[in-house]
Image (spheres, rainbow, N blue to C red):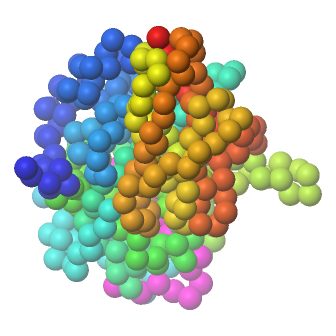
Amino acid sequence: MRDPARRAGLDRRSFLKGATSAALLTAWGPNLAALQERPRLIVRSRDPENLEFPFASLNGFITTNELFYVRNHFPLPRVDARDWRLRVEGAVERPLELSLDDVRRLATRTQAALLECAGNNRAFLRPQAPGVQWETGAVGTAEWAGVPLAAVLDRAGVRNTAVEVILEGSDRGEIREPRSPGVIHFARSLPLAKARQPEVLLAHRMNGAELPAAHGFPLRAVVSGWYGMASVKWLTRIVVTDRPFHGFFQSLDYIYFERLAGLPNTTPLTEMQVKAAIARPARNERLPRNEMVRVHGAAWTGESEVARVEVSADAGRTWARARLLEPNRRFCWRLWEYNWRTPDRAGPVTLMARATDARGRTQPGRRDEDRRSYMINHLLPWEVEVR
């Protein structure tokens, strides 16, 4: 059997044909068997296209290209690889303009890394929060291949005054809420220290195939350990700057409140929070009484490592240790499982999973309102029905 990490990605037409034909699944119910047999992306919005990995179908470490979640802010840009150029400018000694062939000729690094949308799990917030209504599948782990951003910065010669690196994509449009100043490109910045880390790639391949259009062809950033908004797709420009960047997606969106002497201070989102998610039983799945059931899922964190996963079958009153299924790989999820005997009486049961990382950070029991509609990692009640 072929390694799923090496499967070729679909072209755009085939990709969208499979993706947009999916039903909008908010509860698995009778669709679960079909989902397991032939999983498809879940449509969360069509304009722009936002597509969710069906998390109940999780069955391996690598998320294939055709099932990797898609997050778009604007319509998919049309990019001709022959005309595409990557410009590197700003506080550099030698401004660059690189073709795709130039990029491919640079020394390539391959690494597996997880990406998670900062709004993953937003559908479970009450009252309903604005934004794409992701459930648990705006996350995935893929094998990326490309050039370390640090190598390109070294080639350009970063000046001593530099503090940040801005990544700009070719996707563009207007935002209604909060309202953007006309047509804008998607852009985010990294502190220079993060930009120079080896885990920050300019990727041109995904799971052994050419980077698919929906995932940023011909070049995207992969900022391991940070939420997905930092991993800018359809990359066209890198600007090294000697002052902090306060762009739209850095100061008006993808921000949260951090308290400074009790006062709310807006802060850009960066590192992913520790989290465990249940794949099966699926939410609202019907289970037999007094039988052993495999509860399984994945857990991840940002720039640390997952150290422990626990499962509760009584809404968080008691917890039992789950088994981690493979060694830690930094910047990736860890799959886990727990064998649970269902009650001998019928009725609803509330499952929960929680993760703790090597820094000792554990998922909080309650939602922090200062996080607005982002960084959603509080304990999630997971209802199943025993019959």
Where 58 falls versus 287 (above or below)? below
Q: Is residue 72 visible?
A: no
Q: Please give the name of the residue rendered at 47% of the width and 84% of the height, measured from the top-left corner.
A: 158
Foreground residue, 383 or 349? Answer: 349
Residues in magenta, as a range: 155-170
Residue beneath the point at 59% across and 66% down: 358
- Considering depth in this image, is 321 or 238 the residue closer to the camera? 321
Whether the magenta-drawn stretch holds residue 271 is answered as no
Determine if residue 307 is in view: yes
Outermost residue, left side? 1
Furthest residue toward right: 261
Question: Going 56% across and 88% down the picture, which residue do you hit?
Answer: 160
Q: Nearer the viewer, residue 189 or 62?
A: 62
- x and y percent of residue 134 in the render? 48, 30
The residue drawn where x is 64% and y is 38% is 379
Residue 88 placement (x, y as % from top left): 37, 72
| Mark count | 0
In the displayed structure, would residue 91 be above or below residue 220? below
Q: Quadrant of residue 324?
A: bottom left
On whether residue 169 falls in the magenta region, the answer is yes
| Residue 6 drawn at (x, y percent) | 14, 55
- In the picture, measured across the screen, residue 334 lies left or right of residue 204, that is right
Front residue of 243 and 338 = 338
